[in-house]
Image (spheres, grey):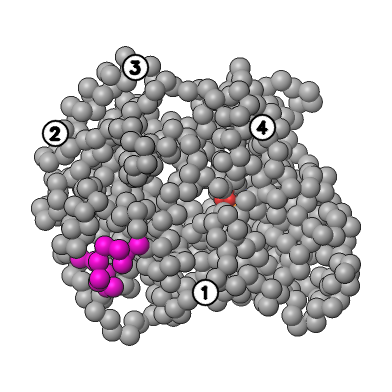
Amino acid sequence: MTLANQASSIPDEDLILPPHVSAAGFRSALTAMGEVVGERFVQICTREKMKPDTEGHYFNLPLEHDLFYTLEKETFLAGAVVTPGSVEEVSAVVKLANKYLTPLWPISKGRNLGYGGAAPRLRGSVVLDLGSRMNKILDVNDRDCTCLLEPGVSYFDLYDYLQNNGFKHLWIDNPDLGGGSVVGNALDRGAGYTPYGEHFSMHCGMELVLPNGEVMRTGMGALPDNNTWQTFQYGFGPYPDGLFTQSGFGIVTKMGMWLMPDPGNDSDLPAVVEIIRQLRIGMVIQNAPTIRSTLIDAAVYAPKKHYTESTGVLRDAEIDKIAKDINVGRWNVYGAMYGPKPLRDLQWEVLKGAFMQIPGARYEFPEPLAEGAKQTVLHMREETLKGIPNTHELGWLNWTCERGSLLGFSPISPATGVDADKQYRMVVKRFHEFGFDYIGTFVVGWREMHHIVCLTFDKTDPDSRKRAHRCIELLIDDAAAEGYGEYRTHIAFMDQIASVYNWGGNASMRFNETLKDALDPNGILAPGKSGIWPKRLRGRGLELRRTAPYTREGKASMDVPVSDITSPSVGSEHSGTAMPPHSRL
Ligand code: ADP
């Protein structure tokens, strides 16, 4: 069936239309886009065609809706998915989007797990799937340790390419899960764990399609036939690259990334927040160490029911038992040293001296595994710390139930013990109130920590979805009241989070809206991304307000006392009941 026939065979009321677009207009837009990208690369979405919940997996995520929905499954349903094959096609589609006022939501791989996946913030938007066809590694430069990528290149792809094409000495940095897009992750300001873990800082040069369809190159890419596009980040004049992260100001079609030269054999190492901050700022620790709670490690190995018969929120004693069973502490630091051996030996002396002052701390290096032996979390982290992509951390999903769902909550924290403690208690209090186990990790950056909290819930249970949603909603406000803000979020919370970044009478949002309206006067690119709505759609009831206060129909897990919370900060008054901090190297 031709695309036009397919479009006309779907009744008007079944089309998922963006605001202010008629069924006829939407059909015309999709038909015109089909002429640009090829008819078979346009999928029209309907409620009936949404992938059933029993399908869909990390490697086979739906592109039209969020697999892990807390609101209704179709709240963030796309009107269509269009898959261009070249920058010229992207540009032509953008021009058509302006003509028909059909909003676009660009994605790379769409594996934005816990943050909405590929789903658009604005229902009815056309998901622009850049990842499926624009997935080439355009260049790897051995001398400069750089590469130039299209949006569809995943960490697995890049790693395999380097391994198989004589570039084994070039390392990549990947986040916890290796299936995401290198470009997409940097654009959403994702992070990894080697010294190159601050992904956006390691990008160098972009090609992008602006909301009016114009194609632009940033940095040295603006100079025709230059030879430094992937080696000098700034070029000449204003440096706009940051404007295209978390913004909806442009569609990135190529991006340069810096690669890390193999630093020699590695080893791993221990710590805790106060110590880590000083060592991090002093650059003794070169990468982002993680301080992981017991249950995040436990969840990597097996679902909750494997450890306990309890279905309520786990209490301290139960978590202590799990920690013992899997031979980890209540808090576990995973880190690594990089560089030539003499340098690492010296580093280790400094690190050991610092960390071993913590009473009860112990450390461990990953020993080579005997044939057929099971990997421990330490081995899994070793892979990640060496930039070897993997999916071990997908285990989190099954903690609560089979085919469970994940909602990410990621506030930024000062790298202090006091703040770690405060953040932890703040989250645990709400999680217990709403019946969720705390699964989380603190990832220490240069001078701050990303507190990454994984709320796992059962989307087949409407009560679980509601609780998950309301819990995060309250936490965003709890965090803001303490001066903490999130670095990244699920699409359902973009408006709320933007609303708490409101210094100076919302000066930052006014600036963003001014830019948005200037760059994207028709408001066709990623409306609602990071809470930035274009003039045409602003204040029209599309923003997601906080839901009505949700009261849970009395369940036992609600009444876990706040005092029954173990603190991550070493030596604080709250750590008394916990097992000694256990540091893993
Ligand atoms: P992942 O890298 O985890 O697979 P996505 O591809 O979904 O994740 O990217 C994360 C988010 O970044 C998307 O929801 C989108 O808002 C934005 N994004 C991804 N790729 C692009 C791109 N090429 N141009 C502009 N924005 C993008």
User: Looking at mark 3, is its residue's CB closer than 8 Å to ligand 1?
Assistant: no
Please provide percent x and percent y for residue 335.
Answer: 33, 35
Query: Given contact means CB atoms under 8 Å apart, are the residues at marks 3 and 4 in contact?
Result: no
Is 326 positioned to the left or the right of 174 in the image?
A: left
Look at mark 4 in the image and give the residue it sits on.
148
Mark 4–mark 1 contact, CB under 8 Å?
A: no
Q: Residues within 10 Å of mark 2 (few under 14, many from 20)?
A: few
Using the rendered image of the protein, determine whether residue 416 is visible from the camera's viewpoint. no
- Return the disc, 2 or 4, that comes first in the chain's sequence: 4
Residue at the extreme top of the image, as rendered: 342
Residue 101 in the image: state x and y as whole percent: 79, 64
The C terminus sits in image quarter: top left
Residue 357 numbered mark, or none: 2
Q: Nearer the viewer, mark 3 or mark 2?
A: 3
User: Residue at 51% across / 66% down in the picture?
Assistant: 68
| Residue 428 on the magenta segment | no
Mark 1 lies on a secondary structure that is loop
Residue drawn at point x = 14 percent, y = 53 percent: 578
Give the residue type that dot 3 points to.
Lys
Residue sitting at x 55%, y 47%: 179
The residue under label 3 is 341
How much space separates mark 3 and mark 4, taking CA atoms?
A: 31 Å
The residue segment tinted magenta is: 303-315
According to the image, label 1 marks what residue? 71
